[in-house]
Amino acid sequence: MNKQKPRIYANTHCLNCGTKLDTQFCPQCGQKNKDYRLSFKDLFSDFLEEILDVDSRVLRSLRMLFTRPGFLTTEYIKGRRISYLPPVRIYLVASILFFLMLSLNTLIPSFQNSNFFKELSKTGDIDEALNNAMESQVQTLTGEQLESEDSDLPQMDPDSSSSGMAVTVGENQFDVQQRDFLVNFSDNFAKMMFLLLPVAALQLKLLYWRRKKLYIEHLIFSLHVHAFIFSLLILTVILDFKLVMWVVILASLVYLYLAMKNYYKQSHPKTFTKMLLLLFSYGLAIMLVMTLTLVATAIGLVLSNSG
């Protein structure tokens, strides 16, 4: 019978803190005991392992988030945290992906309407498409110059995503690009949604004040629910038709009800009533935030254009 050879580790002392090692991980600081000579493979591996934390926790966390509403919150509150992704990370990944795709969806039409993309679709050759697009652009600019000499009327941009829109501030009216407005609004609204999390947690605290739960527990619950909703909203950006939006709304309502029922463990009538109260109060908060974001985005674009 062959004897298993003892495992030989890369270093006898931790490269991070200097602790003597005979294990795979440093007992003092937790750094992995391996050869840290830099290579592209190591850099990419560290990126996946340390930044994205791509391991079994990701799949397990996503599976529990989608299939067992309220479960991740319960596990986190009980202290069972090493097996799942932290709630803040889950929320940030879902929300950033959603708003990033929303911004890209706003910018993509201008790319699709570009001469290069049209030529590439026709020819399939990048070099030929680039040359044709450049020639077409030169002809367009030459034609616009000749027309501008004969007419004082402004030329209309054929790209609808770059069309102008009028913004009124006080008694003054300013022209801004629709695409710039949508992109800036998306960025600002993403930040404002993050600020709405404490508001949602406060509303839950008021609704469940007899449950004697800490405010931070309601905040963690809010993070998980928002992460699920943002994950579903990504589908509305990808598929882009109204039926998906209604499916997402229905799924979000069902998920919220089940999450509240499973985590707060109250009767069905109480859970349903409190969900309606939460939807009403949170809906008012979202409308207020959206209005303020629209105003702030418009004023920001006007000030940047006037500057």
Image (spheres, helix red, strand yellow):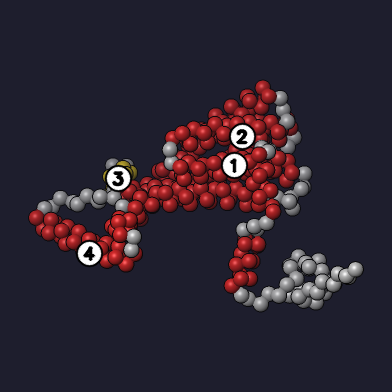
CA gap, disc 4 and disc 3: 30 Å
Q: Which amino acid does label 1 sit on?
A: Phe
* Rendered-image quadrant of the N terminus: bottom right
102 and 111: which one is in front? 111
Q: Nearer the viewer, mark 3 or mark 1?
A: 1
Residue most extreme to the top: 269
Q: What amino acid is at disc 4?
A: Glu
Quarter-of-image position of residue 72: top right
Whole-angstrom CA distance, mark 2 to mark 3, is 38 Å
Q: How far apart are marks 3 and 1 (CA)?
A: 34 Å
Q: What residue type is labelled 3?
A: Met
What's the CA distance linking mark 4 and mark 1? 48 Å
Residue holding disc 2: 255
The tag earlier along the polypeptide, 4 or 1, is 4
Specify the farthest residue to the front.
1
Type of residue at label 2? Tyr
In the image: residue 11, left or right of residue 224: right
Q: Mark 4 sits on what residue?
A: 135
Front position among marks 4 and 3? 4
Extreme residue in the right direction: 1
